[in-house]
Amino acid sequence: MMNELSREIYGNIDSLSKIVFYLLAVLSICCFVWGIWIRLRIWRLRHKGGLNLSQVANRIFSKVFLQKKVRSGPRKWGAGLAHAGLFFGFLVLFIGTCLVAAEEYSQLFLGRDANDPIFHKGLYYALFELTLDIGGLALLAGCGYFIWRRIAVNSSMENRISDWVVVLTLLYLGISGYVIEGARIILEGSSPAWVSPVGLVFAVLFEGMGMTTESASAFHKVNWWMHAIAALGFVAAIPYCRLLHVVAGAVNIALRDYEMGRLDPVSFEEVEEKGYVGSGSVGDLSGAQLIALDACVSCGRCQDACPAYLAGKPLSPRDVIQDIRAEVLKLDFAQLSNPEGTAASSLDGVISEETLWSCTTCNACVDACPVDVAPLEFITDMRRYWVGEGALRGTPAASLQKMQRSGNPWGMPANERFDWADGLGVQTVRENPEFDVLYWVGCAASYDPRTSKVARATVKLLQAAGVNFACLGPEEKCTGDSARRMGEEFLFQELAEANVDTLNRYKVRRIVTHCPHCLNALSRDYSQFGGSYEVMHHSQLLQELLSQGKLVLTGNASGRKVTYHDPCYLARTNSIIKQPREVLEASLQNGQDLIEMKRNGCGTGCCGGGGGRMWFDDKPEERIGRDRIAEVQQTEASVVAVSCPFCLTMMQDGLAAVDSDVDVRDVAELMAEALD
């Protein structure tokens, strides 16, 4: 009985209809291929460097087929599951259609009769039909959720009429497939209930409405044609609507070369050739960036994660991508294939200067994007252009001038850079050339009295553990991290080359720093200028010393409840999450638990000080990071521990603005208090 299970592929469809269907199918595929070909010409696929095929395969498998990033995020699990259901349902139905086509063409090639299937029979056929039934239900569930969300929920997803057409077409394809199956069952006789359970439900429903075998034939044929036309139209439309992200998103994930926390350098030769630095026109966008523009589905996840947007700033990472894409789409085919034509399309006025400098470069938008689009890459490239045009003014411009003149954003003299260490017996690299670890102090701890206490606490711990360390003292300059993130690339390169020359002259191999921004610059940026070092955050080294038994703590740092704020450049950008917490837990009283904020780890909230925002004069009610201050207060902790000098300052100022008495301490300060 099982071996007899099968069905004619084009049952109830005459030969002329089959010919017309094939002609329409060819037309649909041609429309699809033409649309993708246009996008390929626009992308130009100028991918940097070679491809690591194993990494590409891993990204495709985890992020495309398993929908890993789509399903991530506590606030997005519903939409993530719905999208996964829609994706897998569509994929199953697409593969099923391909298998049916393979059976049909195999029969034609071998000259077999339509009633004598080659492999579309028996157990295979039964499992095939059942799988398609389940896939159709997943598709319908996904469509139903997204329709409900668009109607009943204030979603961050951009809402277009074309989106309604897409989701309603998918809904129709899913339902009409079951309708056709129900009519076919009446025509050909019922199959076992488990083979096509949903189709059988429709067959029973139709029979209950009085459908006969004769009426089922016409009903089946009309619905088959409506379903076929809708399906072929859907395929043809993919490159011309938001569905393009199905292709562009997969390509972007596969070819993505953006490394979080790392910016590509600009050469003087490039500036001489263009006459300016950064992205000033569409022609300055790389092939990878053009792919990313088409990959963006405008879901709004980046916007939901952006601290600047949450603080009421004019920055929406989604709008940045969509506005630039709209500018690209304004160009005709000839312009897009001609570099001079794209260069003529200026980005001036597309994204405002206020929008660009609202960004804290926290990488939250990059981390949130399910198809690996990096809005931050576009923002920093355009910042470079506007800095080159002299558009940055006020206090941030003054901080850059001080960096260039004095080697630090405070404009303080180099001979005062080592004053923080008075009375500690700290040696410089000249005094201790046999040092094992270089302690990179940074500008904040060198010149800001409050942050200097962090450096003094760190030194106390290193000395207690017997670490052979030294400092550069007056020879240390700003790493230039803020300069590079603000867009002043060549000032950064000047500072980086000077620091690399100093570090290499003293044969530095291992560096520890309490500043995540210095850590990121020294480890990721300086490698572009001949600096290759093992760079550690002070919490990493302190945790290492604890585990080796070189530091003994009494565990009575504060006697108060403590919450920990993850710095963006430590947790999200450099994945250093566990070590600061282990240091804190060892420093707290026995039995005292560390209170976690709602957003923590890689999903941390931004303090608002990164990307050069530290040097902007915002009114308290306009500061980025107010939501983070609210989270600190919600924990009812009396101490908020930090591990970044920018976070230390921003947290103190933010808490003072709301008259909070919560104390802000670096993890090293709390650990030093607990030192035996």
Image (cartoon, rainbow, N blue to C red):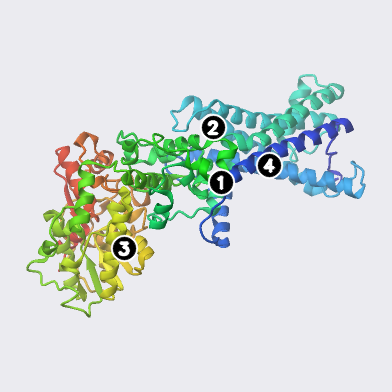
Between discs 3 and 1, the one toward the N terminus = 1
Front position among marks 2 and 4: 4
Tell whether label 1 touches label 4 (CB within 8 Å): no
Front position among marks 2 and 3: 3
Task: Give how far across and how far down residue 297 sits, in percent.
Answer: 51, 38
Q: Please state which amino acid type lies under the numbered disc 3.
A: Leu
What secondary structure is found at the residue carrying circle 3? Answer: helix
Residue at 31% over, 66% down = 535
Front position among marks 1 and 2: 1
Q: Please state which amino acid type lies under the numbered disc 4.
A: Val
> For this view, does 95 lie left or right of residue 40?
right
The residue indicated by pointer 2 is 145
Front residue of 385 and 563? 385
Q: CA distance from mark 2 to mark 3?
A: 46 Å
Q: CA distance from mark 3 to mark 1?
A: 33 Å
Q: CA distance from mark 1 to mark 2?
A: 33 Å
The residue indicated by pointer 3 is 522
